[in-house]
Image (cartoon, rainbow, N blue to C red):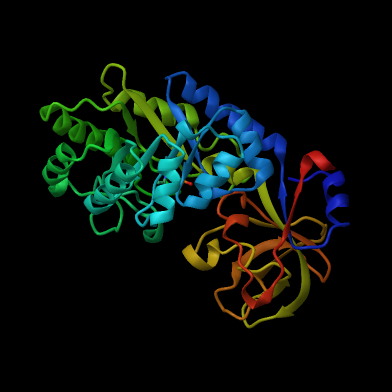
């Protein structure tokens, strides 16, 4: 929902653009903070969901850590004032430069995804006379019940270390003096709305913990990643996800040992609902079954529908006419450049403004310049 003042402001700006509602962001962050602090859990913001400076500054102010998946994200987190000892660095393919950057900055942990990666980190840390903190990213083989492109915790996925490799890893760690094992890490996928998947994860984490305890290893940290889904059907509903229920579930089912800290890496759930993509209708034309509303944003500004068949709610925010059905499509020369099919919207004409909702996560950050398009700008509710 947008106020008349917002729409008046939108009408003066060149489309397409990203719009961020800062009050909403703060509302969501407050919910996350209150719900997690109740249990003493530590939340790192997964920067890949949205690395916009203004948003990052606010997230930092709230006191969250950072979860990074590239060297540039690690550097950005440091530049934005996140403390290196709150930065977790995951990724199945860290380059030599990225590993060195993490070691030089004494980051909280490298989440290691293979035995070879551990060997390389140990070798690089030894050269610098340092000890790098590492966590093992474990593939829990838990189904996330989400789109197969954003499922990461199954044995068939490229991520993490599998159960049958544990003995080999412990053997390796016994001989490596420049890495320190501080924890275990899991991340089973994204846009997960089925809480049973998280319950299964807890049970698997307990089993993995038992293995380490049997091997006389007490880990300081357990990191269960992110993946908490939002309600794309109802963008104005901030009661989903239910952060209280989410953290409570982990408190109830995951068996923490004394002094152990439980960490989370939430991305989407923290930022998705504070952002929208605002675009203008260029042309309307009749198709065989529906009409086409051709808008000036495309997969270059929001690739999720093309990449994951993702649903985003689409609203005509300037028309007051009756209802009709439209395929809302972008200008890019790809048939997948479609935001929604048979979308029910107010009767639409050239020049109307369309809001594609819930684009705060994996929107701006995945933008490209395909077709030599300009990158869209961002605007903020605070500036109106
Ligand atoms: C992407 C990612 C996250 C965040 O996922 P969301 O679904 O946005 O919460 C957390 N941890 C790791 C390792 C990731 O790759």
Q: Quadrant of residue 155?
A: bottom left
Q: Is 378 displayed left or right of 365 in the figure?
A: right
Horizontal and vertical percent position of residue 228: 45, 41
Task: Relative to 257, say whether 124 is above or below.
Answer: below
The residue lying toward the viewer, choosing from 322 and 148, is 148
Q: Please report the residue visible at 34 percent of the width from the left and 43 percent of the height from the top.
A: 111
Q: Is 290 displayed left or right of 230 in the figure?
A: right
Q: Please report the residue visible at 62 percent of the width from the left and 49 percent of the height from the top.
A: 360
Q: Is 213 displayed left or right of 144 in the figure?
A: left
The residue lying toward the viewer, choosing from 41 and 93, is 93
Check the image and name the residue furthest to the bottom. 288
Q: Quadrant of the N terminus?
A: top right
The residue lying toward the viewer, choosing from 127 and 304, is 127
Horizontal and vertical percent position of residue 240: 53, 37
Residue 227 visible in the shown view? no
Q: Is 278 displayed left or right of 320 in the figure?
A: left
Q: Quadrant of the C terminus?
A: top right
Horizontal and vertical percent position of residue 292: 68, 75
Tally of numbered discs? 0
Residue 140 visible in the shown view? yes
Q: Please report the residue visible at 88 percent of the width from the left and 51 percent of the height from the top.
A: 8
Horizontal and vertical percent position of residue 141: 24, 48
Q: Quadrant of residue 184?
A: top left
């Amino acid at each position: 929902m947008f106020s008349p003042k917002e729409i008046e402001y939108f009408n003066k700006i060149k489309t397409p653009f990203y719009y961020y509602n800062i009050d909403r962001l703060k509302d969501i962050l407050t919910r996350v903070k209150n719900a997690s602090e109740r249990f003493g859990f530590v939340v790192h913001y997964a920067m890949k969901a949205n690395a916009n400076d203004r948003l990052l500054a606010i997230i930092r102010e709230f006191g969250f850590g950072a979860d990074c998946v590239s060297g540039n994200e690690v550097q950005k987190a440091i530049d934005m004032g996140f403390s290196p000892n709150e930065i977790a660095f995951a990724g199945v393919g860290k380059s030599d430069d990225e590993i060195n950057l993490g070691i030089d900055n004494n980051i909280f942990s490298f989440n290691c995804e293979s035995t070879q990666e551990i060997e390389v980190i140990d070798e690089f840390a030894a050269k610098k006379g340092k000890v790098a903190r590492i966590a093992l990213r474990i593939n829990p083989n838990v189904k996330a019940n989400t789109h197969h492109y954003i499922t990461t915790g199954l044995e068939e996925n490229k991520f993490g270390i599998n159960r049958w490799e544990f003995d080999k890893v412990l053997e390796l760690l016994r001989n490596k003096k420049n890495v320190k094992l501080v924890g275990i890490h899991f991340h089973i996928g994204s846009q997960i709305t089925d809480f049973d998947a998280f319950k299964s994860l807890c049970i698997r984490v307990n089993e993995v913990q038992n293995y380490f305890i049997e091997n006389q290893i007490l880990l300081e940290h357990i990191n269960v990643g992110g993946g908490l889904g939002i309600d794309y059907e109802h963008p104005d509903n901030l009661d989903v996800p239910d952060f209280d229920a989410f953290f409570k579930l982990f408190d109830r089912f995951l068996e923490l040992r004394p002094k152990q800290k439980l960490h989370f890496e939430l991305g989407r759930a923290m930022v998705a609902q504070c952002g929208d993509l605002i675009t203008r209708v260029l042309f309307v034309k009749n198709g065989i079954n529906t009409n086409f509303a051709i808008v000036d944003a495309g997969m270059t500004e929001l690739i999720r529908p093309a990449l994951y068949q993702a649903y985003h709610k689409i609203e005509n925010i300037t028309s007051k006419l009756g209802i009709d059905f439209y395929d809302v499509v972008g200008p890019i020369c790809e048939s997948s450049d479609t935001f929604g099919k048979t979308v029910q919207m107010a009767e639409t004409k050239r020049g109307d403004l369309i809001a594609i909702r819930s684009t705060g996560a994996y929107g701006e950050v995945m933008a490209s310049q395909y077709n030599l398009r300009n990158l869209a700008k961002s605007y903020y509710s605070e500036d109106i």
